[in-house]
Image: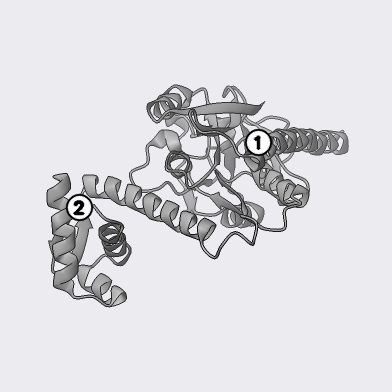
């Protein structure tokens, strides 16, 4: 197996076609096909099924593709690290993959402000839980940020244990409902799923094949399944829908000063346990100094968000009183 063969498989996956991959790589279609077929025979698996419409990856092929992309990324990082001599200090590197939480973004910004290195490469990626876990397992992220709940903890922890990943809790919060400031239910101190039943429910799109436990929100109980739903794939889209309609979403409820939409408020949801927020990393992976610093800043950012959220809720109570 060679890096060249891996790059062929990855390019075919990106293009969805051996012919287009060959054009992009300035190679013959037969040359790529032969190299990939040799690799399939070596490993004893079939990467994809070929047809006139292109290629469709098999489950084994999808798994291999993820590993191939990770290996090529590691190769690229190593080449960047050691190319061009050692006259320039190696860049300080840190990457985090997180579910869509403003307090995680806040912690990342705090890390940037505290970093004194003259040469660094930091990255933050917002994604669903399944991708967050995968990014950590395949070392595309040093740390992942996600949540556990009473409904999902057993299943998610099993997934983490199977992949030798550990969870570190930084905060716990009751599930809350996000609605606009002048929503018909905005005057309530606490909400129930029964009260919410007549309003549209907004949730984040899940990756293809991801389990229901890997969602980013507290799912409604079956007996209160909403008749109207809105699926979005970004935090900005969710904020826009919530701020402009009578729709609602359910999550940890933490609002972050300067990063949360001031048009949206959070109200506790009655009788649904708690949400435990935290970060993950490989059990056998040593945390880099930026990763350790980020973990500490994440806890601070979550605590500040909790305090800010309580302050906003108290102000609403005073105004109603």
Q: Nearer the viewer, residue 128 or 255?
A: 128
Q: Is residue 32 left or right of residue 321?
A: left
- On residue 202, the disc is none
Q: Residue at x 62, y 55 (%)?
A: 91
The C terminus sits in image quarter:
top right
Q: Nearer the viewer, residue 25 or 191?
A: 25
Q: Are marks 1 and 2 in contact (CB under 8 Å)?
A: no
Residue at 40 percent of width and 36 percent of height: 212
Label 1: how many Cα within 10 Å (few below 14, some 14–19, many 20+)? some
Residue that numbered label 2 is attached to: 47
Q: Residue at 26% x, 59% y: name it.
A: 9
Looking at this view, is 152 or 161 the one in front? 161
Whole-percent x, y for residue 243 in the image: 66, 54
Residue at x 47% of width, y 32% of height: 224
Is 98 situated above or below 73?
above
Position of 290 with respect to 25 (left or right) is: right
Residue wearing tag 1: 292
- Nearer the camera: disc 1 or disc 2: 1
Tell me the element at label 2. Answer: loop
Percent across and percent down for residue 50 are 14, 61
Where is residue 29 drawn, in percent x and y? 17, 73
Q: Earlier in the sequence, mark 1 or mark 2?
A: 2
Q: Is residue 82 visible?
A: yes
Q: Which one is in front, 204 or 60? A: 60
């Amino acid at each position: 197996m060679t890096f060249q063969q891996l790059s062929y498989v990855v390019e075919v996956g990106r293009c969805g076609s051996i012919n287009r991959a060959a054009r992009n790589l300035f190679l013959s279609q037969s040359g790529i096909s032969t190299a990939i077929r040799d690799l399939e025979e070596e490993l004893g698996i079939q990467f994809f099924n070929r047809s006139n419409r292109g290629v469709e990856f098999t489950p084994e092929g999808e798994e291999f593709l993820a590993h191939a992309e990770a290996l090529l990324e590691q190769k690229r990082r190593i080449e960047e690290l050691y190319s061009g001599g050692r006259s320039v200090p190696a860049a300080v590197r840190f990457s985090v993959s997180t579910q869509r939480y403003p307090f995680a973004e806040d912690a990342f910004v705090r890390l940037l402000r505290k970093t004194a290195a003259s040469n660094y490469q930091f990255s933050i990626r917002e994604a669903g839980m399944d991708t967050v876990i995968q990014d950590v397992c395949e070392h595309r992220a040093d740390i992942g940020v996600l949540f556990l709940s009473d409904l999902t903890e057993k299943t998610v922890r099993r997934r983490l244990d199977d992949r030798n990943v550990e969870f570190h809790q930084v905060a716990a919060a009751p599930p809350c409902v996000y609605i606009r400031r002048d929503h018909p239910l905005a005057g309530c101190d606490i909400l129930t799923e029964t009260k919410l039943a007549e309003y549209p429910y907004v949730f984040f799109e899940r990756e293809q094949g991801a389990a229901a436990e890997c969602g980013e929100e507290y799912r409604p109980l079956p007996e209160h399944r909403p008749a109207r739903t809105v699926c979005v794939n970004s935090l900005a889209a969710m904020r826009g829908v919530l701020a402009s309609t009578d729709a609602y979403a359910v999550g940890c409820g933490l609002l972050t000063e300067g990063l949360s939409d001031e048009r949206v408020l959070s109200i506790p949801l009655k009788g649904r346990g708690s949400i435990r927020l935290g970060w993950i990393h490989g059990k056998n992976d040593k945390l880099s100094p930026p990763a350790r610093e980020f973990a500490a800043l994440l806890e601070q950012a979550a605590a500040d968000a909790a305090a800010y959220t309580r302050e906003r809720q108290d102000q609403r109570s005073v105004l109603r009183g």
